[in-house]
Amino acid sequence: MSGTGARRAPSAVVVVAVLAAIVVGLGVSVAVVAGIAGGVRAAAESVAGSATPLPTHGPTVTESMQILTEDVQAERHIVTSYGAGFGPMYTNASWSVQAGDTVVLRIRSYDDGPAPLMGAQTMFDRVEGTVGGVETVDGKTVRQVANDDVAHTFTVVGLGLNLPIPAAPTGGYVTVVARFVPHKTGVFTWQCYAPCGSGPNLMGGPMAVEGWMEGKVQVVR
Ligand SMILES: [Cu+2]
């Protein structure tokens, strides 16, 4: 009987060794696949960039924006030529960065009213064009915001960048942070695609006015 037991013991070791080999093998395969994927991404990025090489590892810069409701605009005594009650407003609506910079974009929104995306624009509930394809919402990493929770978007079609901004808690704010690296130079219009304005389809009023729900991102060399 003890002889049988002695024969079983080595076979268990062999099984463990085989399992270990499989795990190591998988680890290598994952690393190889990740390496290939990284190479493909790098190639895609260089194709998408300008004809002349641009720096790809510039400094990290921070851009901060806020989305102010009519109430918060009134609290802060913000006076515009559109008068009170025109609609929600992005502040610091236009800014400039250098190509190749890692831009940390922080958007703080005080708007607690959702404006779900409609029709073909429901695709803007997904994060696009950021480092890792993610944004953080109050520190939590997400790839998408449920359409019913979307209040605004920060969308730069020309840079392939999209950040969905969820509704804030009542009376508070929500902070969305994402990183992106612009590889193209130029002046790119950003737009909110959530129907948060007035008029037909709620796409009028502030939705159509620069400095409210649209603005410019300039990427310089
Ligand atoms: Cu909006």
Image (cartoon, rainbow, N blue to C red):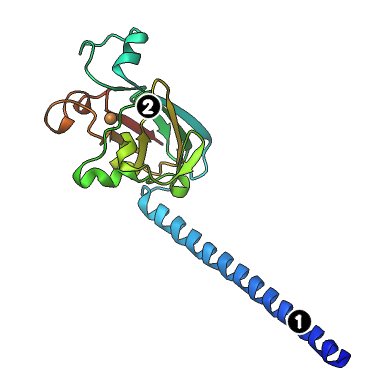
- Residue 179: tell me if it is visible: yes
- For marks 1 and 2, give the CA distance: 64 Å
Residue 188 screen position, x and y as percent: 30, 36
Q: Which mark is residue 12?
A: 1
Whether residue 170 is situated above or below residue 159 in the rendered picture = above
Is 109 displayed left or right of 57 in the figure?
Answer: left
Whether residue 98 is situated above or below residue 71 in the rendered picture = below
Q: Name the element at disc 1.
A: helix
Answer few, some or many: residues within 10 Å of disc 2's Cα (few below 14, many 20 plus, some between 14 and 19).
some
Residue 186 screen position, x and y as percent: 32, 37
Instruction: Indicate the amino acid at tag 2.
Output: Trp
Q: Give the residue at mark 2.
A: 95
Is 3 displayed left or right of 72 in the figure?
Answer: right
Residue 106 screen position, x and y as percent: 45, 30
Q: Quadrant of residue 19?
A: bottom right
Residue beneath the point at 19% across and 27% down:
208
Q: Nearer the viewer, residue 161 or 163?
A: 163
Q: Name the element at disc 2.
A: strand
Answer few, some or many: residues within 10 Å of disc 1's Cα (few below 14, many 20 plus, some between 14 and 19).
few
Q: Quadrant of the N terminus?
A: bottom right
Q: Nearer the viewer, residue 176 or 19?
A: 19
Residue beneath the point at 36% across and 51% down:
48
Whether residue 16 is situated above or below residue 199 in the rendered picture = below
Residue 37 screen position, x and y as percent: 48, 62
Instruction: Indicate the amino acid at tag 1.
Output: Ala
